[in-house]
Image (spheres, rainbow, N blue to C red):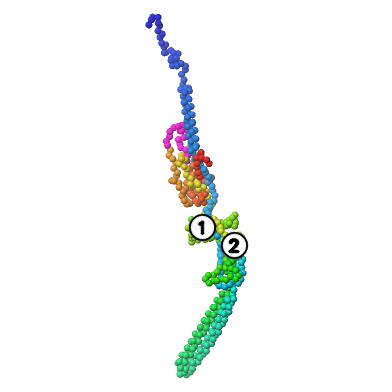
Amino acid sequence: MTSSEKITPPASPSTPADLQTLIGGGPTRRWWQRSTLWLGVAVLLAAGGGLYYWQSQQRAKAAPVYVTEEVRRGNLTLNVSANGTLQPTRAVTIGSELSGTVRNVLVDVNDKVKKGQVLVELDTAKLDAQVLRSRASLAAAQARLAQAAATTKEAQAGFGRLQEVARLSGGKVPSAAELDSGRATLDRAHADEASARASVDDARAALSTDVTNLSKASIRSPINGVVLTRTVEPGNAVAASLQAVTLFTLAEDLTRLRLDVSVDEADVGSVKLDQKASFTVSAYPSRRYPAKVTRVSFGSTKTDNVVTYITWLEVDNSDLSLRPGMTAAATITSTERNDVLLVPNTALRFTPAVAAGAAAQPASSSGGGIMSQLMPRMPRSGTRRAGGTGDAADGAGRVRQVWVLKDGVAQAVNVQVGISDGRKTEVSGEGLAEGMAVITDQRSAGAAP
């Protein structure tokens, strides 16, 4: 180093201007005044908002959409359907007890007849001759009876004289043999008289039979009614050797008919006497006739392995629009409930899906802010339906469960079920009221309606 060279001393650090130069110059900034920090915060908020929006969209897509129906109050009726045939309340078949030839037919189908009115007349030539023969036989028997009575009187007089002679002679005459002979003659006379009397009775009975047969040749109506069928014509030969031949069918009163229906064995338990019913016939399809159950048969009828029970329905036919033999489709009202709460059967079968279990629970206390979405939290257990599996219980009076929608949340309500017509069911319970929305189905938000 030469003497001419000069060494410049360093500046003193205590000088404020020099210190600011060393630090970087300019005034010192606070942490909240730094743009880098705010940029990071903005990025974080944007990321959180995007995440929250994405999760909201995913929840919206995953959240179920519930299909609901209102709980209504109304009437519910259980009906039993059956088919049958109209019959007169009393039908009488008219036949002939005699064999012979039809001489005259006095009535036709649809004719009204009175009790005792002659319907058919048979040829009576043979019957008239038989009556005459019987009358002659009776007269002959009566003559024989008179003769026997005279003989008895004569024998009694002769035996009386013998007894008087024996008394006057002191028993010397007549002889014992003569007395015995007189007594025997009298006894024979009494026997002959009794036989003749019996012959008269027999002849009188034969005459009565022939007269009765003659009266039966005129076939009469036993009731007041209407002729339904006629199967005889003048000149027909009637043979009644084994059974009576059916000539007519009469109905006593067509203003009252009977509907015989076949009730299935599965429904017969709910059919009772005096239950209301109605039916239609093909002749008047738009008209429904009232009826009433009057008999439920204990005997069964089996056709093609189907067991049914004949049930009688009483029918008013004052206007005579119905006719015997018409087929009818009947509906018997077996059970009726008025002014009850009704829910659709689909509501009783509905159970929320497992994926929608969390949605069916009320909101938890963890909050729903952005930070709660960013911060980890404890896992939540799935929804468990009260009352076990919730399977349907058959029969009325059982406790079932329906789900109602309150403030967008599905809540379970226990109800007691009554009767059901296959579409609606009677229910009762403290947690259910008219106008409530019961859930019948659910689907995801993205599913087509």
Circles 2 and 1: CB distance less than 8 Å?
A: no
Q: Please give the label number shown on residue 102.
A: none
- Estimate the x, y position of residue 162 in percent, counting from the top left: 49, 92
The quadrant of the picture occupied by the N terminus is: top left
Residue denoted by label 2: 255
Q: Secondary structure at mark 1?
A: strand
Residue denoted by label 1: 263
Q: Of the residues under marks 2 and 1, which one precedes in the sequence?
A: 2
When the figure is inspected, residue 242 is found, relative to residue 284, above or below; the finding is below
Q: Amino acid at mark 1?
A: Val
When the figure is inspected, residue 370 is found, relative to residue 6, above or below; the finding is below
**In the orientation shown, which residue stands out farthest toward the top?**
3
Q: Secondary structure at mark 2?
A: loop
Disc 2 crowd rating (10 Å Cα; few below 14, some 14-19, many 20+) is: some
> Residue 102: which quarter of the image?
bottom right
| Residue at horizontal 44 percent and vertical 40 percent from the top | 382
- Estimate the x, y position of residue 360 in percent, counting from the top left: 47, 41
| Residue at horizontal 47 percent and vertical 38 percent from the top | 363
Q: Any magenta on residue 364? A: yes
Magenta highlight: main SS: loop
| Residue at horizontal 53 percent and vertical 45 percent from the top | 70
When the figure is inspected, residue 64 is found, relative to residue 179, above or below; the finding is above
State the extent of the magenta-drawn residues as a range. Answer: 359-379
Q: Amino acid at mark 2?
A: Thr
Disc 1 crowd rating (10 Å Cα; few below 14, some 14-19, many 20+) is: many
